[in-house]
Amino acid sequence: MNRNHETSFKDPVCGMEVSRTTAVDEFTHLGKAYYFCAGICREAFEAEPEKYIHRHRQHGIKPK
Ligand SMILES: [Zn+2]
């Protein structure tokens, strides 16, 4: 069941699903916007963005 008409994003720090309205905080890194469930998640991401981005790297896909 998916009644959510909003695009959802995954909080890269804790993995929680957030949308533009439920997200408490956002941060733009390398031109991409990330949404967070809480300020502490945004702060953690801001401190070490690579650490969280690499966790979501897709395996087997090489960017060209
Ligand atoms: Zn979070």
Image: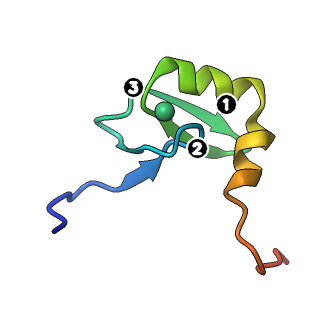
* Left or right relative to 1: residue 52: right
From the image, tell me which residue sits under label 2: 12
| Residue designated by label 3 | 24
Answer with left or right where residue 30 lies relative to residue 7.
right
Q: Marks 1 and 2: in contact by CB < 8 Å?
A: yes
21, 36: nearer the viewer: 36
Q: How far apart are labels 3 and 2 at the CA level? A: 14 Å
The structure residue drawn at horizontal position 27% and vertical position 54%, both measured from the top left corner, is 6
Question: Going from the N terminus, do you reach mark 2 or mark 1 first?
Answer: 2
When the figure is inspected, residue 44 is found, relative to residue 36, above or below; the finding is: above
17 relative position to 28: left or right: left
Figure quadrant of the N terminus = bottom left
Precedes in sequence: disc 3 or disc 2? 2
**Which circle, 3 or 2, is nearer the viewer?**
2
Label 1 residue SS? helix
Q: Is residue 61 above or below residue 36?
A: below
Q: Of the residues shown, which amino acid type is indicated by label 2?
A: Pro
Quadrant housing residue 63: bottom right
Task: Residue type at mark 3: give it.
Answer: Val
Residue at 50 percent across and 19 percent down: it is 39
